[in-house]
Image: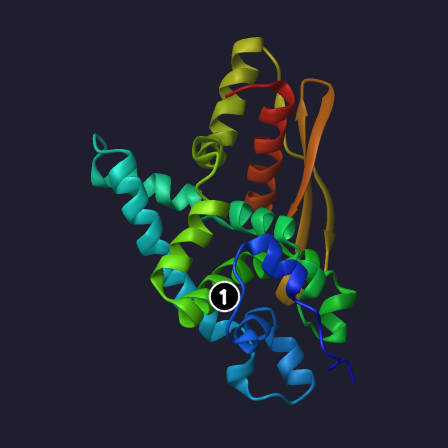
């Protein structure tokens, strides 16, 4: 049974927050599949903390964008918030913070690549935020989001428009643009799609996501970086 104690101190160092109640961080990094496999109480996995973190993130992001873009109407602020807190952005941050290396998963989830699955990584960014809020309140929660999400804000927001920007570039250059599906893997409830970007005759970035659209957006975003287009 995989219930040995995990050392979360390297993750706390990367997060920039040390928990008074370490069990909250453990819960935030425990997937439901692990709880089911080892018959742990429902409250011990991350879904409740993710629910809380999602609401806190929406509030913090809304407040930040409200002050940062005083000229924008509600509709434009909503679009910027959606692009900022999307699965792609949050999963990349979680990957950089090492959540995938310490998340507790069932054997089945581990074998099907759960620790790299964008949907799980995205959820963990929010569950850790919920855990920080429960442990220390709103101020450290805001610091967590400020440090890990609001840095390079414009670059992160660019993600939502990546496919449109890349299409405009291809049209301007007289090139075709295609997103070939390279691979589909994983069980039916957790498919992972691998998509490439082909501009003209050249294959650029490839990306994996839980939906074809998500993989296309991620690959398009990476291609913009490779082509130095903004």
Can residue 100 be seen in this snapshot?
Answer: yes
Whether residue 5 is situated above or below residue 215 in the rendered picture:
below
Residue at point 78%, 85% (across, down): 1
> Residue at 73% across / 18% down in the picture?
201
**In this picture, is 150 found above or below 188?**
above
Left or right of 135? Residue 204 is: right
Occupied quadrant, residue 118: bottom right
Coordinates of residue 71 in the picture (x, y in percent): 21, 30
Q: Crowdedness of circle 1 by 10 Å Cα count: few (<14), some, many (20+)? A: many
Residue 30 lies, in percent from the top left, at 61, 73
Vertical arrangement, residue 145 with respect to residue 138, above or below: above
Please determine whether, in this image, residue 222 is positioned above or below residue 194. above
Which one is nearer the viewer's eye here, 195 or 30? Answer: 30
Q: Nearer the viewer, residue 196 or 6?
A: 6
Q: Decide if residue 30 is on the left or right side of residue 160.
A: right
Q: Position of residue 23 (x, y in %)?
A: 56, 78
Q: Residue furthest top?
A: 173
**Residue 206: where, in percent of width, then height?**
70, 36
The residue that disc 1 covers is 127
What residue is rendered at 35% in x and 48% in y? 61
* Residue 187 visible to the viewer: no
Q: Secondary structure at mark 1?
A: helix
């Amino acid at each position: 049974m995989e219930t040995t104690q995990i050392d979360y101190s390297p993750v706390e160092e990367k997060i920039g927050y040390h928990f008074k109640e370490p069990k909250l961080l453990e819960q935030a990094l425990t997937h439901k599949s692990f709880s089911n496999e080892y018959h742990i109480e429902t409250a011990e996995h991350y879904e409740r903390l993710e629910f809380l973190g999602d609401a806190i993130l929406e509030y913090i992001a809304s407040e930040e964008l409200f002050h940062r873009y005083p000229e924008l109407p509600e509709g434009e602020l909503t679009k910027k918030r959606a692009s900022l807190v999307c699965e792609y952005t949050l999963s990349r941050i979680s990957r950089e913070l090492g959540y995938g290396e310490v998340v507790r998963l069932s054997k089945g989830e581990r074998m099907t690549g759960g620790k790299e699955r964008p949907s799980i990584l995205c959820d963990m960014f929010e569950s850790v935020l919920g855990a920080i809020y429960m442990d220390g309140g709103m101020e450290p929660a805001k610091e967590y989001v400020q440090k890990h999400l609001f840095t390079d804000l414009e670059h992160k927001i660019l993600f939502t428009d990546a496919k449109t920007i890349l299409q405009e570039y291809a049209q301007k250059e007289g090139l075709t643009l295609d997103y070939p599906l390279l691979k589909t893997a994983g069980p039916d409830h957790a498919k992972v799609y691998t998509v490439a970007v082909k501009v003209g005759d050249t294959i650029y970035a490839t990306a994996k996501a839980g939906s074809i659209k998500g993989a296309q957006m991620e690959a398009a975003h990476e291609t913009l970086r490779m082509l130095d287009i903004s």
